[in-house]
Amino acid sequence: MKILFYALRPFDELQYCEPNREKYGIDYKWTEEVPTPENLQLAEGCDAVSTNPCEVRPEYLEAFAKMGVKYLPCRSIGYDHIPLDAAKRLGLRVSHSHYPPEGVANYTIMLMLMATRKMNQIMVRAAAQDYSLPGKMGHDLSSCTVGVIGTGKIGSTVIRHLSGFGCKILAYDLYPSDAVRPYAEYVSLNELYARSDVITLHLNATPENHHLINAEAITRMKDGVLLVNTARGTLIDSESLLQGLESGKIGGAGLDVVEDENGICYYNRCGEALPNRELNLLRSYPNVILSPHTAFYTDVNVASMVQSAFEAVADFAAGRSNPCEVHL
């Protein structure tokens, strides 16, 4: 069995490939390039093609299938960049990666702290040697009610770690977890919107969750609510977010993900006009903290993402089930 890694980063991911080749007995080849019509032939002789979040068109999958590719192990927890209908039609199997939840969970809490304490404004003004106080007064997270939407591995870890701050925690999930109940109160989504000073999202990108935070949802929230998103950009309707910020209904945001970020995040776009109007507008708000989809980015998580690709293909070759396989 052999994997082709697209968009493999030589400065961090590559070091984990050889140890996993030896561990799982799966060969590999790699390129720094994302899939394009010009480089699809690299998949010749490979049984699996692994990508991180980048553009993967249905016609790419058709070409891979004709070359004998059978498996698509994503090096990311999200897999919404894969055209799943095409994968199912072509008989291609898909998996996502796994990694410990602590990295993203702690990053989420960091964004909460930065948003509540107006760190964006403090740091920008300090860089210009403005050390005055007006406009910098924030809120103590301990006095806030935090609403956590989605209590899977990452959401539940956020709740457990956040409990040490002494804040009131509300939770919403279609499938409540008994492990969360000692730390948070499960409520309806409408009640969470109405009571929360800070709302953080921890959901997969699905058709049902698309634009969960839209204009109607925002009207049900507290005035001045802070929104935090380290999950998927499509959970928030960017236009509704901008309108909420402009009106003051939304008091600020800490965003590690935004809509239509593919082709921007993970690339050096210095000096270029970014092809994302909403992102450009969000960057102009002093009460919006933006980071380029880096909540996952720790040494432990990168190692786990590479390993999970090898692991999924090894399980496929051996006829074993893999808990990270996507059910098409």
Image (cartoon, helix red, strand yellow):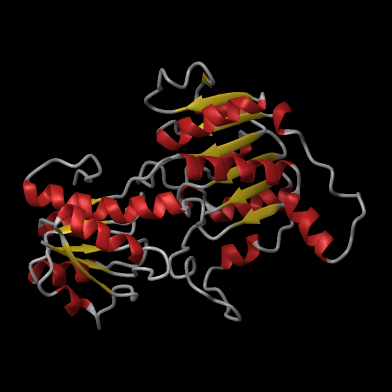
Residue 102, given in percent of the width and then of the height, sits at 48, 40
Is 32 or 290 nearer to us in this picture? 32
Residue 287 is left or right of residue 105, and the answer is right
Picture residue at 66% right of the left edge, 23% below the top: 166
Residue 54 is left or right of residue 189, and the answer is left
Residue 160 is left or right of residue 49, and the answer is right
Residue 30, given in percent of the width and then of the height, sits at 26, 72
Name the outermost residue toward the bottom: 38
- For the N terminus, the image quarter is bottom left
Compared with 188, 245 (above or below) is: below
Is 160 or 78 nearer to us in this picture? 160
Picture residue at 64% right of the left edge, 36% below the top: 198
Residue 229, given in percent of the width and then of the height, sits at 54, 46
Compared with 131, 98 (above or below) is: above
Compared with 204, 63 (above or below) is: below
Residue 69's image quarter?
bottom left
Residue 5 is left or right of residue 267, and the answer is left
Compared with 162, 226 (above or below) is: below
Picture residue at 89% right of the left edge, 61% below the top: 130
